[in-house]
Image: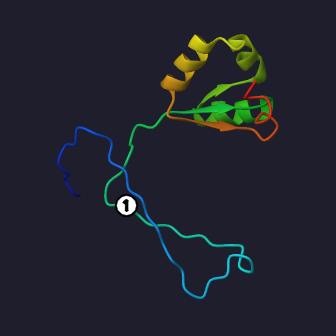
Amino acid sequence: QITLKKRNFTETIEIQITLKNYDPQRDKRFSGTFRLPAIPRPNIKCCMLGNAAHCEQADRIGVAHMSTEDLKKLNKNKKLVKKLAKKYDFFLASDNMIKQIPR
């Protein structure tokens, strides 16, 4: 276990990689993983914006979720939307919900 010095700011890392003999037009699939020495955000909060099926799945695994009806209750109220955005670190959305979210 590596102990790191406490920082007073959010640390970020940027990586730029050049791959030799790799043609992105021809070789479409590329994946890999890299294990970081320390967990960057251990207590991350997620919210699922989805249809009934995805909300049910989120409920089973213990992730917060909002349905289309819950989003309609916000009704473009900027204060409620900002409060919701501050409450979670990131959101996941169903493919059919993505078109409705900006409204």
On the image, which quarter does residue 46 sit in?
A: top right
Residue, x 72% and y 11% (percent of image)?
73
Residue 88 x/y as whole percent: 51, 29
Quadrant where the C terminus is found in the figure = top right
In front here: 5 or 64? 5
Residue 25 x/y as whole percent: 74, 77
Residue 76 x/y as whole percent: 70, 14
User: Which residue is label 1 attached to?
Assistant: 36
Q: Is residue 69 above or below residue 37?
A: above
Position of 68 compared to 7: left or right?
A: right
Residue 101 x/y as whole percent: 73, 29
Position of 35 compared to 100: left or right?
A: left
Q: Is residue 76 above or below residue 9?
A: above
Residue, x 77% and y 23% (percent of image)?
68
Quadrant where the N terminus is found in the figure = bottom left
Using a 10 Å C-alpha cutoff, classify the residue at mark 1 as few (fewer than 14 neighbours), some (14 to 19) or many (20 or more). few
Label 1 SS: loop
Amino acid residing under circle 1: Leu
In front here: 63 or 72? 72
| Number of numbered callouts drawn | 1
Q: What sort of colour scheme is used for the picture?
A: rainbow
Q: Is residue 84 above or below residue 5?
A: above
Position of 95 compared to 39: left or right?
A: right
Q: Residue furthest bottom?
A: 21
On the image, which quarter does residue 34 sit in?
A: bottom left
